[in-house]
């Protein structure tokens, strides 16, 4: 009986974690060093808002007709953003290319698990992003 009592706190914590009451992934902080890899201030602001799970700020970086390609396949940008933000985030930023409009890193999704990904931002004539390309990446 003493052994069982010793495991009760551990089981309680595990149940709270499994139910999402602790350890929730609504916000992920990346180190300043990793953020420093992004030298494009517009992309940096968008990534920071994504990481914070701030949907309205994230969407404010895109024009109203923004499109999304997921591994080359069209998806509804608003639906993706609404469903993913707060549940998906970068766990590291490994590199930035193309004037920091192409971001590569390790990524976590509550639905799909952990994998390497890219976010490629395309800027429209109005200065806001008009397209986002996402997908799995081969990065070292």
Image: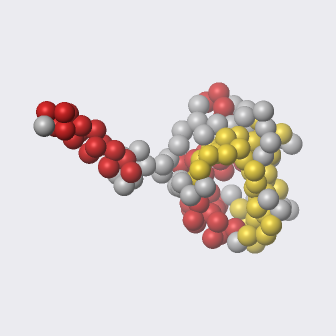
Which residue is situated farthest in the top direction here?
33
Residue at left 83%, top 62%? 72
Q: Position of residue 123 (x, y in %)?
A: 82, 56
Q: Position of residue 117 (x, y in %)?
A: 72, 47
Q: Position of residue 15 (x, y in %)?
A: 32, 49
- Whether residue 6 sits left or right of residue 50 in the image: it is left
Residue at left 70%, top 72%? 76
Residue at left 71%, top 44%? 116
Compared with 20, 82 (above or below) is below
Does residue 49 appear anywhere in the picture? no
Residue at left 76%, top 61%? 70
Q: Nearer the viewer, residue 28 or 98?
A: 28
Q: Position of residue 115 (x, y in %)?
A: 67, 46
Report how many numbered discs are placed on residues in the image. Answer: 0
Q: Quadrant of residue 37?
A: top right
Which residue is situated farthest in the left direction here?
1
In the rendered image, the quadrant that contains the N terminus is: top left
Q: Quadrant of residue 57?
A: bottom right
Q: Nearer the viewer, residue 67 or 41?
A: 67
Question: What colour scheme governs how the chains and residues are painted in the rendered image of this protein?
Answer: secondary structure
Q: Nearer the viewer, residue 75 or 33?
A: 75
Does residue 52 appear anywhere in the picture? yes
Compared with 34, 75 (above or below) is below
In the rendered image, the quadrant that contains the C terminus is: top right
Q: Nearer the viewer, residue 10 or 79?
A: 10
- Whether residue 28 sits left or right of residue 58 in the image: it is left
Compared with 64, 132 (above or below) is above
């Amino acid at each position: 009986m003493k052994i069982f009592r010793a495991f009760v706190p551990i089981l309680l914590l595990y149940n709270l974690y499994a139910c999402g009451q602790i350890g929730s992934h609504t916000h992920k902080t990346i180190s300043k060093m990793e953020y420093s890899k992004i030298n494009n201030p517009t992309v940096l602001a968008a990534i920071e808002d994504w990481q914070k799970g701030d949907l309205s700020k994230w969407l404010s970086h895109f024009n109203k007709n923004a499109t999304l390609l997921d591994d080359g396949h069209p998806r509804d940008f608003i639906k993706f953003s609404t469903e993913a933000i707060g549940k998906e985030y970068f766990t590291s930023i490994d590199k930035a290319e193309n004037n920091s409009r192409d971001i590569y890193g390790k990524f976590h999704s509550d639905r799909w698990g952990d994998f390497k990904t890219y976010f490629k931002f395309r800027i429209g004539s109005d200065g806001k992003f008009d397209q986002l390309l996402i997908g799995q990446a081969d990065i070292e």
